[in-house]
């Protein structure tokens, strides 16, 4: 079956986005095994809803966070894209915007926040610091890029990125969500660290029960 | 529009390095014959005599410990420079002490004389490993408790000893105090921070109302706060240490990223410190431009203060109104500096670009606009019963406490302490403008809030006086391509958006500083949180923290 999924954003022509190749690769991978028409139609519907209601976690460590606030406020207004429902609890958030420097002291906290979020979850690295350590690459206390500790979906460069780049980055994330399967797969990017542990525990339990 | 690429590594935006304007070899500026205006000649005291000297100075009315800088002089020892100021006479004294013992360096603590010394000494312990006898709480303050070594020592192997630790950080419930006995021996004693029966709640580091990544351990008695133990360092980026390996123009870039709502003033302070040390006099035009930019930044910061406070208390509309007005200032910045938040505008000897032709008309437009919208903000929020109840009489800091804790800026002025550097030690063009230092007496959350709202008006009046009188002149003095500050110790300070921002520069005559220490405006404010909040309700922590107005990257540096 031909590629039917095209991550389209209303009012912005497909060609105007940079980096369409990544998406085409994603879509090609999805289609490799052939798609079920009914499931993919349902997928499209769900993904349309999901991509337009991504709830970010209120998470900001430094300067970039102020620009994030500016994006939330009146002039730039992320409500236009459905991102305005910022959540203070990671349990309710879909996407974590890592805006600001992540220090080695913060790293375990960030990892825990990420682990607490429910699947499917996304990570956007905002600003030079989150991408690679930014101006602090010489520092002894800065993590040189959050992708060292959690998987990143979209990188938004800048120091700080302009609000427009924020929005562009978020649109890229929307396109990514649109190019995903929802039914039949989980969108995990990493192996569940507790899966093996749970299995052995379950086995032990079963064995115990059998013995009893 | 900037590009964003998915799943492809994009190189980070490197901080713009200010270029020295003069490329041609400029005629050497005449070597300054007189000592630099801001050079400090500290009184040198042996560690054993330090206590006596400090007690004498304290008795002589040096009641404000402005800055405490730890230094590693290598063969001259490890030590500190204390900057003391008298709030009544304005006199400033520097005291220097150093110990030669690198294995087990000990200095006497002065934390009982000035409350703020408590956290400053912990900082010095954290960075240099100097332990203070008589200090009740000798724990690390920024780095993890299991950190190995002392990163600011010149011979420390920080990276090697400290891989990225992904385990949860240990937090001790008790702490060490070193007691200096009469016979000269030192014994160690344990002090409890939280006892076994204490009900301790963790607030932060990920909490929307702590204004960044700040962690409070709060002991509660019902809903009343018994004790607060702030845990810092979640955004400690080691800026001061990085600076030691950067050239002077490069060090400027990082100042904007500490207190990003005081970017102009921070950079102003550092530029001023280096210029004075070099004996460079900037043109009148630069002075006026810097003054105006500082004031715009102050308004920007205070409006953001208002917005965030309102947001924290649940008033989202007020937040949106605040940001609407803030964008007007950002527009002005953007046209002249190119950036919205991180501005990179001041350079050593001048400013980066000349004013944009739209600058003057825009500022003229802004003044009446903001005066009007301030009325709107007041109508929206100030009179609100909920806010009034939560702010009036809550979190009171007395004048004595404010001075002892070194809470400068709006927090100190709300308690009746006249500490505005623009008045007490005028710099740039502040001596030629008329404005009032806003001071109130109550010292509660409401006063702290009102101070900032009133300061916006004063800043507008400063802008109004200057906007038609921007003198002609060059915007950049001719500097040598490689800037080397003559050997010595220098200190300059400006009035930042939230208090005194000082720069202590120790140079050995190289092209990068030997030690560069920033007097953070926020660290004393966080140190005072325990005193401010004890006895208040847990919910008041948010109001108090909001009105005290600290910026965490500036606290942690
Ligand atoms: S990328 Fe720049 S603006 Fe963003 S947090 Fe880092 S230093 Fe601050």
Image (cartoon, rainbow, N blue to C red):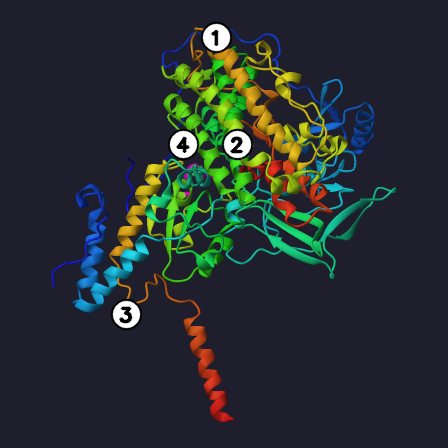
How crowded pointer 2 is (Cα within 10 Å; few <14, some 14-19, many 20+) is rated as: many
Q: Is residue B87 magenta?
A: no
Q: Which residue is mark 1?
A: B469
Q: Nearer the viewer, mark 1 or mark 4?
A: 1
In terms of image quadrants, where is residue A188?
bottom left
Tell me which chain the residue with mark 4 is part of.
B
Q: Is residue B368 left or right of residue A127?
A: right
Chain-order first, disc 2 or disc 1: 2
Q: Residue furthest bottom?
A: A212
Tell me which chain the residue with mark 3 is part of.
A
Name the foreground residue: B331 vs B177: B331
Q: Residue at x 20, y 41 (%)?
A: A16
Marks 2 and 1, Cα distance to the nearest angstrom?
30 Å
Q: Which residue is mark 4?
A: B15
From where the camera sits, is residue B70 visible? no
Residue span colored magenta = A133-138
Q: Nearer the viewer, mark 2 or mark 3?
A: 2
Marks 1 and 3, Cα distance to the nearest angstrom?
70 Å
Ligand 1 falls in which quarter? top left
**Pointers 2 and 4 within a single chain:** yes
**Pointers 2 and 3 within a single chain:** no
Q: Which residue is mark 2?
A: B377
């Amino acid at each position: 079956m031909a590629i039917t999924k095209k991550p389209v954003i209303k009012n912005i022509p497909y060609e105007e986005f940079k980096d369409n190749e990544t998406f085409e690769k994603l879509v090609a991978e999805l289609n490799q095994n052939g798609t079920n028409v009914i499931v993919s139609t349902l997928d499209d519907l769900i993904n349309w809803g999901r991509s337009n209601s991504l709830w970010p976690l209120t998470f900001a460590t430094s300067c970039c966070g102020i620009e994030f606030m500016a994006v939330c406020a009146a002039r730039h207004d992320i409500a236009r894209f459905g991102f305005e429902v910022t959540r203070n609890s990671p349990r309710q958030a879909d996407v974590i915007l890592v805006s600001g420097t992540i220090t080695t002291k913060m790293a375990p906290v960030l990892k825990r926040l990420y682990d607490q979020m429910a699947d499917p979850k996304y990570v956007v690295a905002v600003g030079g610091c989150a991408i690679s350590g930014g101006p602090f690459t010489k520092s002894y206390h800065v993590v040189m890029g959050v992708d060292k500790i959690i998987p990143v979906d979209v990188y938004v460069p800048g120091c700080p990125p302009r609000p427009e780049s924020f929005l562009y980055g978020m649109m890229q994330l929307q396109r990514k969500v649109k190019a995903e399967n929802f039914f039949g797969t989980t969108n995990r990017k990493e192996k569940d660290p507790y899966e093996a542990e749970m299995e052995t525990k379950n086995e032990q339990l079963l064995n115990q029960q059998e013995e009893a | 529009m900037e590009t964003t690429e998915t799943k492809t590594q994009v190189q980070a935006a490197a901080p713009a390095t200010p270029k020295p304007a003069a490329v041609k070899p400029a005629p050497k500026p005449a070597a300054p014959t007189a000592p630099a205006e801001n050079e400090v000649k500290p009184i040198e005291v042996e560690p054993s005599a330090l206590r006596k000297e400090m007690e004498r100075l304290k008795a002589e009315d040096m009641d404000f410990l402005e800055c405490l800088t730890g230094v590693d002089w290598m063969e001259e020892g490890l030590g500190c420079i204390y900057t003391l100021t008298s709030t009544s006479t304005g006199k400033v004294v520097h005291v220097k002490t150093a110990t030669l013992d690198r294995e087990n360096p000990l200095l006497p603590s002065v934390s009982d004389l000035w409350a703020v010394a408590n956290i400053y000494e912990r900082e010095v312990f954290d960075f240099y490993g100097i332990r203070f006898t008589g200090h009740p709480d000798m724990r690390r303050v920024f780095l993890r408790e299991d950190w190995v070594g002392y990163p600011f020592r010149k011979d420390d192997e920080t990276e090697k000893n400290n891989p990225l630790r992904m385990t949860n950080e240990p937090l001790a419930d008790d702490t060490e105090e070193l007691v200096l006995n009469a016979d000269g021996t030192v014994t160690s004693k344990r002090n409890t921070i939280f006892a076994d029966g204490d009900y301790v709640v963790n607030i932060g580091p990920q909490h929307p109302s702590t204004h960044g990544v700040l962690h409070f351990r709060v002991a509660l008695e019902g809903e009343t706060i018994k004790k607060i133990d702030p845990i810092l360092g979640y955004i400690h980026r080691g800026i001061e240490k990085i600076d030691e390996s950067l050239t002077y123009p490069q060090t400027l870039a990082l100042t904007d990223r500490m207190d990003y709502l005081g970017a102009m003033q921070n950079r102003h302070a550092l530029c001023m410190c280096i210029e004075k040390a070099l004996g460079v006099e900037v043109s009148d035009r630069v002075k006026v431009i810097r003054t105006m930019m500082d004031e715009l930044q102050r308004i920007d910061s205070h409006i953001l203060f208002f917005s965030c406070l309102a947001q924290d208390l649940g008033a989202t509309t007020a937040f949106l109104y605040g940001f609407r007005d803030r964008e007007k200032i950002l527009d002005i910045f953007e046209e002249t500096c190119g950036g919205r938040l991180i501005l990179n505008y001041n350079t050593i000897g001048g400013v980066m670009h000349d004013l944009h032709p739209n600058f003057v008309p825009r500022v003229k437009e802004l003044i009446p606009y903001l005066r009007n919208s301030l009325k709107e903000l007041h109508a929206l929020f100030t009179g609100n019963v909920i806010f009034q109840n939560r702010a009036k009489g809550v979190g009171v800091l007395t004048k004595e406490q404010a001075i002892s804790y070194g809470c400068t800026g709006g927090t100190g002025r709300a308690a009746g302490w006249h500490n505005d550097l623009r008045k007490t030690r005028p710099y740039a063009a502040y001596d030629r403008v008329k404005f009032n230092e806003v001071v109130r007496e109550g010292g509660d959350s409401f006063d702290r809030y009102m101070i900032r709202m009133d300061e916006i008006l004063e800043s507008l009046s400063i802008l109004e006086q200057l906007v038609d009188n921007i003198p002609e002149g060059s915007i950049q003095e001719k500097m040598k391509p490689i800037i080397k500050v003559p050997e010595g110790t220098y200190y300059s300070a400006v009035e930042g958006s939230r208090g005194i921002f000082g720069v202590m520069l120790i140079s050995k005559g190289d092209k990068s500083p030997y030690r560069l220490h920033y007097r953070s405006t926020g660290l004393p404010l966080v140190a005072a949180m325990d005193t401010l909040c004890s006895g208040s309700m847990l919910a008041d922590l948010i109001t108090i923290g909001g009105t005290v107005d600290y910026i965490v990257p500036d606290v942690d540096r």
